Each structure stands twice: as structure tokens, then as C-alpha cells.
Image: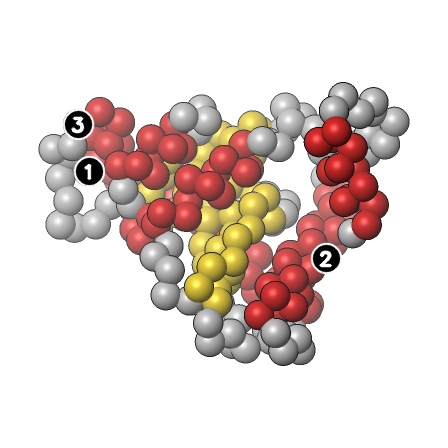
Amino acid sequence: MEKGAATLKVAISVLVLVFCTVNKCHLMCGVKTNVVTAVEIHERNTNDSPILPSLVETTAKHFDVAEVSADKGYSSVDNINAIVKHGAIPFIVFKTSVTGASGGLWEKMYHFFQFNRDAFLTHFHKRSNVESTISMIKAKFRDHVRSKTDTAMRNEVLCKALCHNICCLIHAMYELGIDPFFNHSAPMNSELDEARHVRTLAI
């Protein structure tokens, strides 16, 4: 789907498959169709919070993001700024130990959280959709992988996300009346576009 065709509200979480003792999968998904909009695989002990900006960046390349919901593990000034940079509103629960002393957007969202908590949590609880997305992937494509090497395991998990998105697209076509548009005839404006096109065909 082309960027600008829909405004997306997304949630973020971490998918930890039971097979994996060294890696974990971080994903961002839409809260209506449950389509995975961005996915990254990092070492299991990698801190979750610094990964959010790149997930938002990837999602914003293809969607107009309206809201981003995440749990307090992603609560930081940098993450709020990264979300607002793309025109979205961050609904990230604040830790009990923080204050609004950092100022700016952090302070505004902190006071919104403190004085309009019911309204804030209404948006935040859309995050539960990411748990549904994780359950969908595990239920349909199993919660383990069969590959043995690190690279193969990563690719297998990415394939699970890809297959999940295909299922979501089919559901959206029939349930939401969405007409998908695949622009195969678009001219290639650079060698980079051509390389991307070849890579897409190879997949």
C-alpha cells in the first residue's frame, strides 16, 4: 500500500520465540489490521528502548503514522522525540520514578499522562493488539524455528512475519474492503531502485 493511503496507529513489542537463546525479534504493527510494519532481530540481551526510533523510521517510510503505543520499557526522551518527528503522538506509559523535568515534549506528555490518565490509557491500551499479533504469528507459524545457524534462524523468523502480513492483507481485502495496489509498472529512477526491484523478485 502506498504511503499516504491510510493513517496508521501502531504498537510495539518484542517477540521472543522459545527456540531462541541468543536472539529476539522486535516488531511494530498496526492496531487494526495487525500488519507488521517494521521488524528487527537483535541479540537477546539487547535493550529494547534504543530500537524504537529505527522501527518508527521504517514504518514512517510506508505509512502516515498517527499514534505509537508502547510500554514503559520504551519510555525515554529520545523515543518520544523520534515519534513526534514523524508527526505521530506517543502514548508510552511513564515509569513511576520519572518527572516532567526534562521539559519539551516529554513534559507535555508526562502531564497529559498524570492529569488525563483515562484518556491517555484509552490510546495506550491499543498496544494489546501487538500481543494479538504475536499470538497470531506463533499460532499459525509455530513458536519455534527449524533452522540451525544464526543467519538461517533470523531469515526464518522474518519469513514468518512476511507470511503473517500476506494473511493480514488477504483478510483486509475482504473484511475492510481494501483494494491493494501493487505498482509493478513504476519506472526505475536509479540504480538503487533497480537493485531493490531485483531483490524483491528474488524474494
Residue 163 x %, y %? 72, 57
Identify the residue position indicated by label 1 in the image.
Answer: 114
Q: Which type of secondary structure does the marked residue at label 1 adopt?
A: helix
Camera sees residue 143: yes
Amino acid beneath label 3: Gly
Residue at figure coordinates x 81%, y 50% from the top left: 202
Residue 194 x %, y %? 78, 33
Closer to the observer: label 2 or label 1? 2
Residue 49 x %, y %? 34, 50
Identify the residue position indicated by label 3 in the image.
Answer: 103
Q: Are marks 3 and 1 in contact (CB under 8 Å)?
A: no
- As rendered, which of 129 and 188 lies closer to the eye? 188
Q: Which is nearer the N-term, disc 3 or disc 1? A: 3
* 60 sits to left or right of 162: left
The label number, if any, that marks residue 163 in the structure image:
2
Q: Which is nearer the N-term, disc 2 or disc 1? A: 1
Marks 2 and 1, Cα distance to the nearest angstrom? 40 Å
